[in-house]
Structures are given as C-alpha cells and as structure tokens.
Amino acid sequence: MLKHFLTFEKNIAELEGKIEDLRHLSSNTDLNIAEEIGKLQKRVADELSSTYSNLDSWKKVQVSRHPDRPQFQDILLNLIEGYIPLSGDRNFAEDNSLTGGIGFFKGKSVVLIGIDKGKNTTDRIFRNFGMPRPEGYRKAIRLMELANKFNMPVLTFIDTSGAYPGKGAEERGQAQAIASCIHSCINLETPLISTILGEGGSGGAVALAAGNKVLMYEHAIYSVISPEGCASILWRDAEKAKEAASALKLTAQDMKSFKIIDEIIPEPLGGAHRDPKQAIFDLGKVLDKTLDSLVSLSKEEIKNQKLDKYLKINDF
C-alpha cells in the first residue's frame, strides 16, 4: 500500500485502507475473506482507471511530483551495469543534485547524467531538492566532452523544478552554465537521448534536454515556469496554480502535439509511483529501441538532426 496519496486519490486511499484492514484481520483469525478482498481490489482498479484516464493539467503536476516516482538513482540500479560515478566540475565543487558517470546499458557503453530530487528529507537536503548549481551543469559539460572523446552515447534523466536561484549560484554564473550546457548538447557528436521523469522545470531542465530524441513519462510535465510561479506573476496569487497549469500547456500530451518531445512512455495504471520497477522496465525498452535507431548515424547527421529539430520549433 502507498504511504503517500494525492489529494484527488481520496476514494482510492479509503478502498486500499479497507483492504489492509481485512488483511490484518485475516492474519489474526481463521476467517477467509479472500473474496471480499478481491472485490475491493477490483474497485480499486476501476477507480484508478477512471481517475487516471481523466487527469487535468493540475492533477498531472501533482502526479509528476509524487515522491515515489522513479528517479535517476533508481534507473542506475535497475537498468545500468558497471556504473562508475564521475564527480566535480574541475573548477569549483561537486553538485549532488546533478550526478553522472559511465556504465553499460544493454551491453553498450554510455555516459549517464541525471538530476535527482531525493527520496527522503535527508536525501532531499543532500541533493538540494533537485535544483542544480552551476557546477552541476559544468560537470554535465565535462561528461559530454568525455562522451565525444570516446564516442559514447549520452543518456540524460531529468526531474527538477528548475536550476537553483540562490545568490551564490548567480555569482558563479548560473545562466552562463545553463547556456553552455545547452550548447554542449546541441554540438554533441554522439547520440543524446533525454528523458523527463517527473518535472521538467525551466532552463534547469532544458540544459539536459536538447537531445536527438526527447522522451517523457505519460504523467510528467515540462514547462518554462511552475504553475505556482506563473500564478504569482500573472495574478499575484499562487492559489490560482490550477488555472496556470492549464494555461501553460505543460503535459506530455501537449509537448508531443507541439513536437517538443518525440515519444510518450506509458505509465503503469495509477502512475509510475505505483509500480516504479515496471515503469523503469518500460522506459528501458523505449531507450533501447531509440538508441538503436541513432547509433548508425554519422557525427554530422547527429548534429544536424538536433539543429533541424529545434529550429523548426520556431515555425509555431
């Protein structure tokens, strides 16, 4: 049973609570209540299907932020073999929100870069709540240079509300670091596949998402600003975040229609947080297929594909 239910999952939470109560009761008595539990489980499945087939933009924002969604560290554990982390930007410091290294994906040597929000309070503080500082983006640039040198594909994984906006980060050139990271993505001569796992917030996400192919989980979001931030600017009222979410057109389905992303990865019933391992397995299949479609391209074709793709966005 989930420990964390979203506000619109009240009915689901109540049903799953009843199932847990019945299981506890059956473990302490000789009663056979399997049939009743089966009926409740069917009601849960029906409720999940009904709820998650009609999510509005604001509900998708909530799902994208669920603490149990797959994160970069989960992907390393489940999809990557022989992972070796590489730390530091060779200039200022290590950034624990944006990490990376080298490893094997389906037998192929790859460079991996990802942003993590953290799993619990201690981990979130350690990872600065998934908000990279300039040294994180400069580390990503260093890893992409490594990928170019050894002709290794790059896989990036994104889950961030945005780059860290603190005074120190600005003093150390946050905007320049993000711009340089985007430049490195575009000029990378090996395949780059970017995946938005949860939140794709502002330039902090774009810095790792200028790939040959951009994938996005079904209930992830991608936006220039958070709904709360947008509402605070437009209406001076963060409570209007729901209206802002709708206006921002930030869902995976919106992004696909705008041709900003290339493929939507379906999530298990009830969202990736209900079955993270299945969600990661499904992501792995799409990554494998996508990487196979890119590895035969020449260096010039890889660069031109990205340039053509992102310049055409201006056609809107």
Image (tube, rainbow, N blue to C red):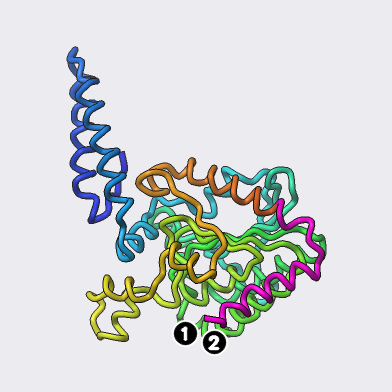
> Outermost residue, top direction?
30
* Of the pair 151 and 136, the residue shown nearer to us: 151
173 in relation to 248, above or below? below
Residue on which the image places disc 1: 167
Residue 248 picture location, percent across and down? 38, 75
Q: Secondary structure at mark 2?
A: helix
* Residue at image coords 25%, 85%: 235
Contact (Cβ within 8 Å) of mark 1 with mark 2: yes
Q: Quick check: 227 left or right of 124? A: left
Asked whether residue 308 is drawn in magenta, I would say: yes
Which residues lie in the magenta part?
Answer: 292-316
Q: Which percent across, then down, holds residue 92?
A: 63, 76
Residue drawn at (31%, 57%), measured in percent from left and top? 55
Q: Quadrant of residue 306?
A: bottom right
The quarter holding residue 29 reads: top left
Residue type at tag 2: Glu
Please tell me which residue is depicted at 57% across the width and 43% down the height of the picture.
78
Specify whether residue 128 is in view.
no
What is the x, y in percent for residue 90? 70, 72
The answer to whether 75 appears left or right of 43 in the picture is right
Kindly identify the amino acid type of the residue bearing the numbered disc 1.
Lys
Task: Kindly identify which residue carries mark 2.
Answer: 171
Q: Using a 10 Å C-alpha cutoff, classify the residue at mark 1 as few (fewer than 14 neighbours), some (14 to 19) or many (20 or more).
A: few
Point out residue 3 in the picture as x, y percentages from the top left corner. 30, 45
